[in-house]
Amino acid sequence: MYILVTAILGALILLLFYVKTSQKLLYWKERNFPYADITVYQLCRSMSTIMFRLKCPEESKKDIYDSGAGMKYFGQISLIKNQIVVRDPDMVYNVMIKDFSHFIDRPFPVDEKNDPMSAHLFALKGDRWRALRYKLAPTFTTGKLRTMSKQLFDSADSIVEYVSHKHEPLDTKQLIYSYTLSIIASTAFGMKVDAHKYLDGERSHKAVGLRLTEDDVKDFFFGLVRDIIQQRKETGRKSNDFLQLMMNIKEEDEKYGEKMSETKREMVNHEEEDKELFENLDTSKKGTQHFEFTDTNMAANTFIFIAGGSETTATALTFALYELSNNPAVQQKLQDEIDSTLIDQELDFATVSSMAYLNQVVLEVLRKHTPMSILNRQCVQDYTIPGTDHVIRKGDEILIPVSSIHNDPEFFPDPEVFNPDRFVDPDSIRKGTYLPFGIGPRFCIAQRFAMLSLKVLLVKLLMAYNVKISSKTKMPIKLTKDFFARAVEGGLWIEFEARN
């Protein structure tokens, strides 16, 4: 009897699930919106693939992209949340730039009152985002990057020194993580952390053996930022780091109010290459000039600077070394550029910035191995797609599959080939097809800092070494199925051969 009742209940649950899911499949059809046709079985199989990590994230995202083949945009049906997927570069451009006012927000929760650590630049919405973006724009100008570059060079020198004492293949991901940790510690908090010293033995990154909850992390960052702020106030010590720049902004707000402070003066007198940082920040809008920094939101923005920068930079550098190892002609051409540039010039911010082929190599790495493979936006007011009667409603979530666009042969012929010459003229790349840092007003504010971080370590390593794939690396490489980090199964092991 018990077995029969259980079986009946199970059947009823499955029937209810089938009916509800079948109704969900009609959502886009009833809205008269293009959609990728899918059955209940296919939908369940797709969700199982994601839930049980049967594929790496890039494969799952490509499946979504390919399901809408032939369509510029389409509704995607999911058991969790229906989304609109954009495949067409012109539509991407409209969402991210031309009609940005309709898609200003990201679909992430923000609760400044109960969870003030959520109030950071990545997640804030509307005028609150615009106000903070306006405040933070001067922290990533060319002048600020120039003064921070010494910390990057010092961190890169420590990595090169570490490699010089090793005579065996090295796990690139771990090596690179130690670099990103060092530069983040110095540029965010003014701390000197020789992270490479923890790569060996029991103090290895892999052997920390400590699990932290989300609340633990938030408490740690808030406490750390609060202590550093208090210490600097008491001692009068200032540092050349991200936190200090925010403290300076807060002090100037308190001191000058609406008067022209140094920060606002820099907004007016910024260098030409900083133009993108200040575009589309209409300071006449309500709330734009009234974001008041507190210790908590300084902690929140420091946290997102670290969380957003460390993993993406480490991923890009790891795959840069992979591609250079796998393409010796590219490696040699890049080394020739480095050598010729440094014949009569010192290695500094200006010389690294002047290396054209280095820039091409980095841009191609970010195309083929995009660290942030998905971009999301949320519609904030109904939007009729130009030339159609299709309406994106307020509240709809837009998904832009960046990695799939970057590897679509329609936009980048032979996308599996690593070819830096695609970027001889970056302006020739079709708008809406290349967006490793996003585009438009909500592009990554730390884009140039990330690019500089990549270039500095590559230059330092290639000045001293040739890089080769070790036999310890399983070829062809396969990506892990981890949804939170883009890594190679078994590790990416590189041999560093000293140059003459």
Image: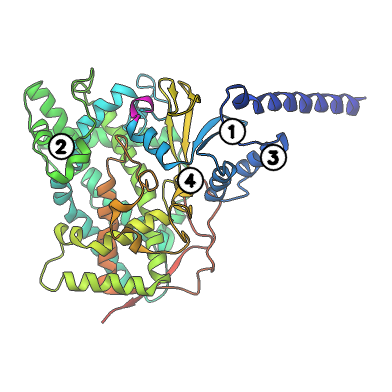
Disc 3 marks a residue whose amino acid type is Gln
Looking at the rendering, the stretch of residues picked out in magenta corresponds to 99-103
Measure how far apart labels 2 and 1 are at the Cα level: 56 Å
Q: Are marks 4 and 2 in contact (CB under 8 Å)?
A: no
Instruction: Nearest to the eye among marks 1 and 3: give it.
Output: 1
Measure how far apart labels 4 and 1 are at the Cα level: 28 Å
Measure how far apart labels 2 and 3 are at the Cα level: 58 Å
Measure how far apart labels 4 and 2 are at the Cα level: 35 Å
Provide the major secondary structure of the magenta segment.
helix
Q: Residue at x 11, y 31 (%)?
A: 264
Residue 386 to residue 237: above or below: above
Disc 1 marks a residue whose amino acid type is Tyr
Instruction: Nearest to the eye among marks 4 and 1: give it.
Output: 1
Location of mark 4 (residue): 484
Farthest residue toward the right? 1
Instruction: Nearest to the eye among marks 4 and 2: give it.
Output: 4
Label 4 or label 1, whichever comes before in sequence order: 1
Label 2 or label 3, whichever comes before in sequence order: 3
Location of mark 1 (residue): 35
Location of mark 2 (residue): 232
Location of mark 3 (residue): 42
Disc 2 marks a residue whose amino acid type is Arg
